[in-house]
Image (spheres, helix red, strand yellow):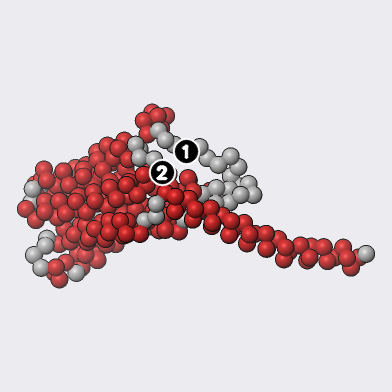
Amino acid sequence: MTAAVACLGNIPSPSASKCSGEEAHPPRCILWFTAAVCIGVVANITVVLPTAHVVAGDVTKSVSFSGWIVGSYGVGAIFGCLVFAQLDIEQLKTAYIAHAVLMCLGNTLYVSAVQVRHAELLICARILMGVEGGCMYNAALAMVHYARGCAYTTYVIVYHGFVAVGVLLGPVLTALSLRFAGTLGGLEPEGVVNFIISIWGLGLLLALVLFFPSTSEAASSSAAEAVSHASAEVDQEDIKAPTEEEPRTKSG
């Protein structure tokens, strides 16, 4: 674990006080894009689990090859962590765009490999998909960079919630795509879900280019949300204050 932290670097120090008076929240735009990235990465891992043995049997006539299909993602993810760790918080948009491009390309290549039944191409596609998994580092970095005070722990939990949604979404997408595979013409049923995820990656790429805020915009948005939240807390305290002092007034 120590070696992994040393290799990745850029690990931000936690807030000095996890529950101090100052609270800051990630800008909503960044929060939604981080959700899409986290869910997409984890769904990309789990999406092949229901069909890997079928693909392995069709391509190599050996069900044991499914282990290579599933596990090769990890090879790309290790390399991806080392690459994405070089991008700091100011390059968050670059990291998310790279994730979307790799998601689109990797799944498109996987669909092609399933169509032509090419074992080596399957492994290359899964490794390419795995590289985009390194973006989970940047997603975690975004959450802990913008969250401060009591909100810090909340957004760490939210991050893990995104991961849980991705774990669920992958197999569900696969099950639905197998059910309706016949509507997409000549695609092999086991590749339909990867075609859907490649479209997801393309849509995410376009959304990032059009709507992702710049670093300065994100910082100002985060500061504005912090001020708004602080003023709301002050208003609540002002409302509660008379009720706390009321018994003393009556007793006097």
Residue 32: give its label: none
Exactly how many numbered labels are in the figure? 2
Please say whether residue 158 is visible from this viewpoint: no
Split into 4 quadrants, where in the image is the C terminus? Answer: bottom right
Residue at mark 1 to residue at mark 2: CA–CA distance: 10 Å
Q: Nearer the viewer, residue 179 or 209?
A: 209
Split into 4 quadrants, where in the image is the N terminus? Answer: top left
Q: Position of residue 148 (x, y in %)?
A: 55, 47
Q: Nearer the viewer, residue 149 or 71?
A: 149
Q: Is residue 244 left or right of residue 55?
A: right
Tell me the element at label 1. loop
Q: Position of residue 119 (x, y in %)?
A: 10, 45
Residue at left 36%, top 52%?
38
Neighbourhood count class around disc 1 (C-alpha, 10 Å): few under 14, some 14–19, many 20 upward: few
Residue at left 20%, top 50%?
106
Please say whether residue 101 is visible from this viewpoint: yes
Kindly identify which residue carries mark 1: 12
Q: Which badge, 1 or 2, is on the more N-terminal residue?
A: 1
Q: Is residue 108 left or right of residue 233?
A: left
Residue at left 14%, top 68%?
184
Q: Amino acid at mark 1?
A: Pro
Which of the 4 image quarters holds residue 32? bottom left
Which of the 4 image quarters holds residue 90? top left
Q: Nearer the viewer, residue 107 or 88?
A: 88
Q: Amino acid at mark 2?
A: Ile
Q: Position of residue 47 (x, y in %)?
A: 26, 55
Residue at left 79%, top 65%?
242
Residue 89: give its label: 2
Q: Is residue 104 left or right of residue 32?
A: left
Tell me the element at label 2. helix
Residues at circles 1 and 2 in contact by the CB criterion of under 8 Å: yes
